[in-house]
Structures are given as structure tokens and as C-alpha cells.
Amino acid sequence: MLACHPSSFTILTQDMPSLIPSVRCFDRTNIPEEVWGALRDRDNVARANVILPHAEKVSSHREFLLDSEQLWLVYSEPTTSNIRFILSCTEGPLGKYPVFIVPVAPITFTPEFFQGPMEAFCEALLNKVDFRKQRVFSVFSVEPVAEAFASAWEKIAGIRCMAEPYYDAFLSVCTSETLVRNGPQPEDEDVELRLAVPQDADKISKLCQEFSNTSPPFTLSDEQASEEAELLIENGQVWVYEIKEEGGETDIASIVAATRQSDTVAAITKVYTPEKWRRKGRAERLVRRVCRELLKTHEQVVLYVGTTNLAQNMYNRVGFQNICRETPRAERWLEIGFDRAEVERGHW
């Protein structure tokens, strides 16, 4: 069970100086170069994938999602310009995203390193004009950062965090050097691995909905699943493993979504194979194909895989690194939710 009790941390009192001056707030029009530099830095860019691609898109295309909420907070060490954390509170075409927080290297994994900045973020959000605390339905970050923010938000905003995280995952990276380019080939199957086309929309919509059903409470209605499928196809972000069945009919045996792409990093965000087509290595072949394509134009492919997800072995075979608690460099991320009765749930 995840502990989110304020007793684990020292909370600001009225006798202590406010930490808000260490926090700067930006919208899509005024993110400064030093913040872009921190997000794109080689030591940060894999972690920053949850923030950077969306920030680049809404900043360079001002008409995209016009009038939507796009907010970034940056915490720097007091009296210095050293950026330590970057927080995003943004929304996409399908809804509001969780609060994402990226720690900036070098990182010291001690409670003292996270406590003050997370309290400062909470104060800054709550003091922002027109910000509603119900907007914060969850936070996603490296484990100690997510826990520190959840504890601070529970204390300062007065909305309790959920006892169990929505998502408990390892951040993993695949590069051209680690990618295992060839694997087992299908036996006696007529298949095509390709980008999806508009004619696939109905089948992909069904698979998107089935995939969402594995991650409650973030399930999709028929309409939402259809919208998601259309967006993925329109943006060239979903690959399919198409198989020809006896009689000549075709079906989609697996999908892989490749989203959140910046200059050097792309993310795999949705891997799903329906029950009928499982246990034949199809997802592995499609993931490997997608990674080969992405690594032609990117230096890294990142993904999050649940700490108890049996697919860890498959991703290891493809070439993703650090998917194991025993791995020294394994990095665990948590999405911690807040009381569903008091927040407005989003989607990502």
C-alpha cells in the first residue's frame, strides 16, 4: 500500500518563508530557452518525454487546442538559476492530462531533495488565479517525486490521495545499440506489419476500448475510443499487425501506438493484442518493427511497463533496458490518483 500521509514530510508553516519565488509559471507563449534546454538535455530527455513533445507542439502551433489549459511550472534552487523540477498541467485533444513532473539531472534521491519543491509547486498552483484544485486528478513522476507531491497536495489542497497507485511502472529505453533487430518469424501466416489507414478505424477503435478496460478508471466510451482511433490514424501514430485468416478475411492481431515524439525520443504508449491472437509472439514482432522504424529518425524509444506486467520479458527480448527491480539503473514511476469524488478525471 502506498503511504501518502503528511507525517512523512515536514510541511511549511506560517513562520517559514514562502517557497513560491523559486517557482516560475509559463504558458505556451513564453517558455524560456533555459527550460527548453533542460527538457532536451541528453541526461533528461527520456524522462522529459511525458512533457516535451506536447510542449513543443502547443508552443509552435498556437492555434492547436486554442483556449485549452496549458501550464508549466519550473522550480529552481533558491537564489540560483539551477532548474531542479519541471511540472506540466496541460491537456490534449481527448482531455486533461495528469500532472507530470520531471526531475532535472543531477538528481539526489533523498526526501529533503523533493519535499520543499513539491510543497512550492502545490502552493503555486493553488495561488494561481482561476486554478481549481479539482483539476489535479493524478500525478505521474519518478516514485519519490510522485509520493512527495501527493503527500504535499493532500496536506495543502485537502484532497486525499488514493491508497494504491493507478500505475506502477518502470521507465525503459531502447536504442540502436540495444535493439535486437531480428526475432522469431511467424509460421505459416499471411501477415503485414504496417501503419494503420482510415479503413482500419473501426477495428482499432475496438482495440483501443479493450486496452482502456485494462486500466480502470481510465476507460473509454464507444465515442471516445472512436475519437482516439481516428486521431492516432490521422497522425500516423498507430501500427497494426494484420493477419489474413482462412477464407481471405483480414483481422488486426495487435496494435502498437508510437506517440510523444520529439527530435531525439519517441514513445511507445499502447501495445495491445486481443485474447484470440495472444501467445504467438505477434506483439513482440510488431514492437520490434516499430522500434526499427522509430530508431531511423530518433536516438531513443521509451516506454513504461507495469512492474508486474509479464510483457517485461518481451520488451527485454526486443532490447528495452532496465525493466527489473534488480537492475541498478531501474527507474520506477508512479501515477498516484486523488479522491475520485472530489476531482475531475482526465485522460491520457
Image (cartoon, rainbow, N blue to C red):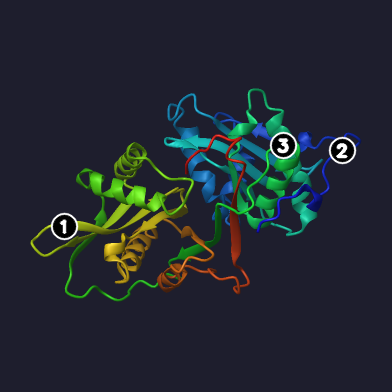
User: 10 Å neighbourhood of mark 2: few (<14), some, or many (≥20)?
Assistant: few
What residue is shown at x 24% (from left), y 45% (from top)?
202
The answer to whether residue 296 of the structure is visible from this angle is yes
What residue is shown at x 63% (from left), y 55% (from top)?
142
**Proximity of marks 3 and 1: CB atoms separated by less than 8 Å:** no
Which label belongs to residue 228? none
Left or right of residue 324, residue 63 in this image: left
Left or right of residue 61, residue 287 in this image: left
What amino acid is found at the position of numbered circle 1 in the picture? Thr
Residue 285 placement: quadrant: bottom left
Q: Nearer the viewer, residue 105 or 276?
A: 276
Residue 193 placement: quadrant: bottom left
Image quadrant where one finds the N terminus: bottom right
Q: CA distance from mark 3 to mark 2?
A: 15 Å
Q: Mark 2 = which residue?
A: 13
Q: Mark 3 = which residue?
A: 158
Q: Which percent across, then down, holds residue 110?
A: 77, 58
What residue is shown at x 31% (from left), y 51% (from top)?
207
Single out the mark in the foreground, 3 or 1: 3
Left or right of residue 155, residue 96 in this image: left
Q: Classify 142 as above or below 85.
A: below
Q: Mark 1 = which residue?
A: 250
User: 10 Å neighbourhood of mark 3: few (<14), some, or many (≥20)?
Assistant: few
Local SS, label 2: loop
Local SS, label 3: loop
What amino acid is found at the position of numbered circle 2 in the picture? Thr
Single out the mark in the foreground, 3 or 2: 3
Whichever of labels 3 and 2 marks the residue nearer the N terminus, that label is 2
Q: CA distance from mark 3 to mark 1?
A: 53 Å
Residue 272 placement: quadrant: bottom left
